[in-house]
Amino acid sequence: MRPLAAAAMLLIAAACSGPSGTPAIPQADIEAAAGRLVSYPLSLDPACRDGRATAYDQCSNQLDLFAAAVKRAQTEDKAVLVIIGAEWCGWCRAFDAHLKGATGRYDYVTKERRGDVSQAALELVRYTAANFVVVHIEDDYAPGADEVVSAAGAQAHFQEKYPTIFAAGPDGKFAAKLDHPYVKIQISGPGAYQGYDRGLVLKELKRLHKAAVPR
């Protein structure tokens, strides 16, 4: 093998091996912060479909979930973060994992760099928990997703692409949509990866919150 080719292979191997060393923030601390995040549905019925859903209620009326999230947001003076998607949607699962502080497999800092994401993970979790009530709206099997979009006045911002993520104010009305292409990290080919730049997600959430709950 030529020297340049060998060097390139070593760089690829290093990139695929992931970060090394001890994270700046223990995962237990991130998970403790995530425990303060309010996310609807609050629980999932194991008798619903195959019982394997982790974030989306595939059976209940989604308008009821949205109404409960709006009521909670009013009580806590928060915005509502609406995530329209489906359980089978990989991007939806990845976004939910980031909001809940998952690291490990999600260790890309940016598209060009892997490393310790623990500090950014903690900041994202804390900000989301302090400023939003999250609601996952299932748009495949469950009834009511169209009614949620209509109730929020978000018809012009939903083109049935998952996830569609937007903020609503405590009144339940659309305020601003998250720029999904801007925040995502997608790598194709060997070592394919789907995840999010936490710094950009945090920046977007701050923009959405300002639109939804102006001070």
Image (spheres, helix red, strand yellow):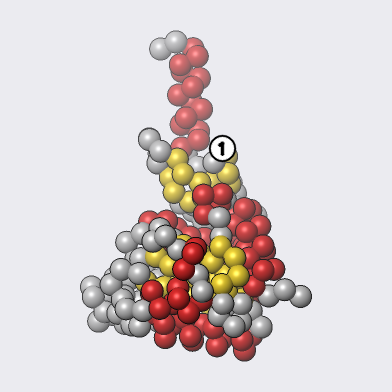
For residue 190, which quarter of the picture? top left
For residue 92, which quarter of the picture? bottom left
Q: 176 and 14: which one is in front?
A: 176
Q: 141 and 175: which one is in front?
A: 175
Q: Is residue 18 above or below residue 145?
A: above
Which quadrant does the C terminus fall into? bottom right
Name the element at disc 1.
Answer: loop
Q: Residue at x 51, y 82 (%)?
A: 69
Residue 208 x/y as whole percent = 63, 65
Residue 138 x/y as whole percent = 37, 71
Residue 182 x/y as whole percent = 56, 49
**How many numbered circles does the render carry?**
1
Q: Is residue 2 visible?
A: yes
Residue 193 x/y as whole percent = 43, 45
Q: Residue at x 48, y 79 (%)?
A: 151
Q: Residue furthest top?
A: 2
Q: Residue at x 55, y 80 (%)?
A: 172
User: As drawn, is 33 to the left or to the right of 215?
Assistant: left
Q: Is residue 142 above or below residue 85?
A: below
Q: 181 and 57: which one is in front?
A: 181
Q: Residue at x 51, y 74 (%)?
A: 153
What's the residue type where badge 1 is placed? Glu
User: As drawn, is 1 to the left or to the right of 208?
Assistant: left
Please name the residue that numbered disc 1 is placed on.
112
Q: Residue furthest front?
A: 156
Dot 1, how many residues are within 10 Å of its Cα: few (below 14), some (14-19), or many (20+)? few
User: As drawn, is 141 to the left or to the right of 67?
Assistant: left
Which quadrant does the N terminus fall into? top left
Q: Is residue 202 visible?
A: no
